[in-house]
Image: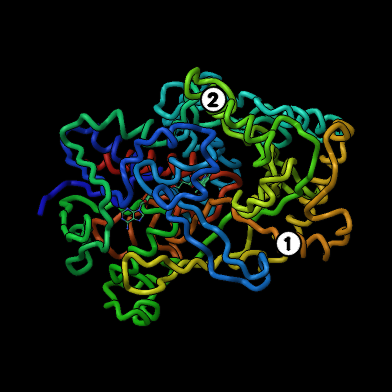
């Protein structure tokens, strides 16, 4: 049994940032425990390998949501989650987005002192090294490299031109003063290599003698002494170990993993714990509740060849060339994300902020890119995400077995406002796709299909092709109400020496992709912890 000052559970977006920032203080010892492997594969550093991870079990926990008969005809929705150092940042789409000022101001208004936009902006900037240089909104000397879209795909440029043709607003910086309109994204990519948190934050810290990193180490529970977290129990190849934490255990296992581990450790809703024969150490009914994710649907268009990478003979030849170019010259399609262009738009003038986000994908992407039949067709996809969904789901235990997949009940589209934004978002997508520039490419709208025109018909098509943004949050929410799990200092209510630092603490989902906000949360948490040393 070894003792450390801080024991961090989970080497993902939050865990790697914490490991770096805390171990920068030579006075403290830090241990990072990760269930997956070191992730030192060429696939991880290749931006264009994104699609591969949807089929991997080594780098992806590859969960599936609870079946809902109204969604995808009852098919369980795919829920990828990164496994191994870097966590989900090792397999994500690399889009660098923060959301809107109002997202964070709402966190503060909910009682989370210190989390307004003006208060979190310095932590976004601290982590960031943006190729656009330092400014009011951007940092240029942080470890996380943020680069511009390289615009490898002609269809991406067509979407930008189309926006002008149908009078959609343009946006020069989705993370600047006014993130509204159509524009090209920025990415966590450095010189054609994925810049996940392991590369950005962990690797530079590995030499430090006060940092210990354990991989292939599956945490099975947090050790408790009454109402104090004293250490962490984990298994390596079936052999159990315990490490103790003299200052804090920090839980960073993500929005599915963190509530699961709390419940396995006897912290949660007493009724839920009892159902699985787990002794209740501390009642916290909010554990696993308040799950939010960006529900999405799409307009899928079959087209003439536009330079994309479909799984058909032309696309495969193009991919072989791309592999050659990347392997020998670090050039070509594989050095970039395929999702180069997107948008934030309002589906109705009365919306105060954009209620939908779009991702342009230069292939036919359905069922998280796992529908091979669709991938084999030539075409392009316009995915529509509800920025601030109001439906709420939950994460609960399937059993007390720490290796069992948790039960993820998304309860998507339960709130009528989510339906409204999604259906109107499809209508707006069709307006964008009707621009003259697409007549050079377009063959046929496959989904929803031109015959689906009424709200009910569009909604039914959306239900059949529903997806999630891979942005689960909120399951250990920060707040001061009875359902809150942590306070604004991210300490678990009623338990000493236990903090949660990851996407699970977001009280409400921000209006966009969640990697940068999770990194910001970890930056702020590290500052709070070090301040008190
Ligand atoms: C496929 C995909 C695409 C995405 N695309 C984007 C994008 O383009 N842009 C963006 O901003 N966001 C994107 N996201 C979301 C973003 O990556 C996540 O929100 C963010 O990484 C979450 O960070 P986290 O620290 O909360 O969890 P994670 O990064 O998931 O880290 C949790 C870590 O804990 C480990 N762990 C879990 N349970 C245990 C256990 N019992 N014992 C030990 N270790 C454990 C996991 O293996 C993992 O390494 C994407 C996510 C996915 C999955």
In the rendered image, residue 26, in percent from the top left (x then y), is placed at 17, 32
The disc label shown at residue 419, or none: 1
Which of the numbered marks, if any, corresponds to residue 147?
Answer: 2
Disc 1/disc 2 C-alpha distance (Å): 34 Å
Rendering quarter of residue 73: bottom right
Location of the N terminus (image quadrant)? bottom left
Q: Position of residue 24 (x, y in %)?
A: 25, 32
- Determine the secondary structure under disc 1: helix
Using the image, determine if residue 169 lies above or below residue 515.
above
Residue 421 appears left or right of 467: right
Furthest residue in direction left, as rendered: 1
| SS under mark 2 | strand
Label 2 packing within 10 angstroms: few (<14), some (14-19), many (20+): many
Which residue does the image show at 69% across and 37% down from the upper left?
362
> Residue 363 appears at what percent x and percent y?
69, 40
x and y, in percent, of residue 230 in the image: 18, 59
Task: Identify the residue shown where x is 60% and y is 32%.
Answer: 319
Q: Is residue 428 left or right of residue 100?
A: right
Earlier in the chain: of badge 1 and badge 2, it is 2
Q: Is residue 410 above or below residue 297?
A: below
257 displayed left or right of 338: left
Whether residue 294 is visible: no
Any part of residue 245 in sight: yes
């Amino acid at each position: 049994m070894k003792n450390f000052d801080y024991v961090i559970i989970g080497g993902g977006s939050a865990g790697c940032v914490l490991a770096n920032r805390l171990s920068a203080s030579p006075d403290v010892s830090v241990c990072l425990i990760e269930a997956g492997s070191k992730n030192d594969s060429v696939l991880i550093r290749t931006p264009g390998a994104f699609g591969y991870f949807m089929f991997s079990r080594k780098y992806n926990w590859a969960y599936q949501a609870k079946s809902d008969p109204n969604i995808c005809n009852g098919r369980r929705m795919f829920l990828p989650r990164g496994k191994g150092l870097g966590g989900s940042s090792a397999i994500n789409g690399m889009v660098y987005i923060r959301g809107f000022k109002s997202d964070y101001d709402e966190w503060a208004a909910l009682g989370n002192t210190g989390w307004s936009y003006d208060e979190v902006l310095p932590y976004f900037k601290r982590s960031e090294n943006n190729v656009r240089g330092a400014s009011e909104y951007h940092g240029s000397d942080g470890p996380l490299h943020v680069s511009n879209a390289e615009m490898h795909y002609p269809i991406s440029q067509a979407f930008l031109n189309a926006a002008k043709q149908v009078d959609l607003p343009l946006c020069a910086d989705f993370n600047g003063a006014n993130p509204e309109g159509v524009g090209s994204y920025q990415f966590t990519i450095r010189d054609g290599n994925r810049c996940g948190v392991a590369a950005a934050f962990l690797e530079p810290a590995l030499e430090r003698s006060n940092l210990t990193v354990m991989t292939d180490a599956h945490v099975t529970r947090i050790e408790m002494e009454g109402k104090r977290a004293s250490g962490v129990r984990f298994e390596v190849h079936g052999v159990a170990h315990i490490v103790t934490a003299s200052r804090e255990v920090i839980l960073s296992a993500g929005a599915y993993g963190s509530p699961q581990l709390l419940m396995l450790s006897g912290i949660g809703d007493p009724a839920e714990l009892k159902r699985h024969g787990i002794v209740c150490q501390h009642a916290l009914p909010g554990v696993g509740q308040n799950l939010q994710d960006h529900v999405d649907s799409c307009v899928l268009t079959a087209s003439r060849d536009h330079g994309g990478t479909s799984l058909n003979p032309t696309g495969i030849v193009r991919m072989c060339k791309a592999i050659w170019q990347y392997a020998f010259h670090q050039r070509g399609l594989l050095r970039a994300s395929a999702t180069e262009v997107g948008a934030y738009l309002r589906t109705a003038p009365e919306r105060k902020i954009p209620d939908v986000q779009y991702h342009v994908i230069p292939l036919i992407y359905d069922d998280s890119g796992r529908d091979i039949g669709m991938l084999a067709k030539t075409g392009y996809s316009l995915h529509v995400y509800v920025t601030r969904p109001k439906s709420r789901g939950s994460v609960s235990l399937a059993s007390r077995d720490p290796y069992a997949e948790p039960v993820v009940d998304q309860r998507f589209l339960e709130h009528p406002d989510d339906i409204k934004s999604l259906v109107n978002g499809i209508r707006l997508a069709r307006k964008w796709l009707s621009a003259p520039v697409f007549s050079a490419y377009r063959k046929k709208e496959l989904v929803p299909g031109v015959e689906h025109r009424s709200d009910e018909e569009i909604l039914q098509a959306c239900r059949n092709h529903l997806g999630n943004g891979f942005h689960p949050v909120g399951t250990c929410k920060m707040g001061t109400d009875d359902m809150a799990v942590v306070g604004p200092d991210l300490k678990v209510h009623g338990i000493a020496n236990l903090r949660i630092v990851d996407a699970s603490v977001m009280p409400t989902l921000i209006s966009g992709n969640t990697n940068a906000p999770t990194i910001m949360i970890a930056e702020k948490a590290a500052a709070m912890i070090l301040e008190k040393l």
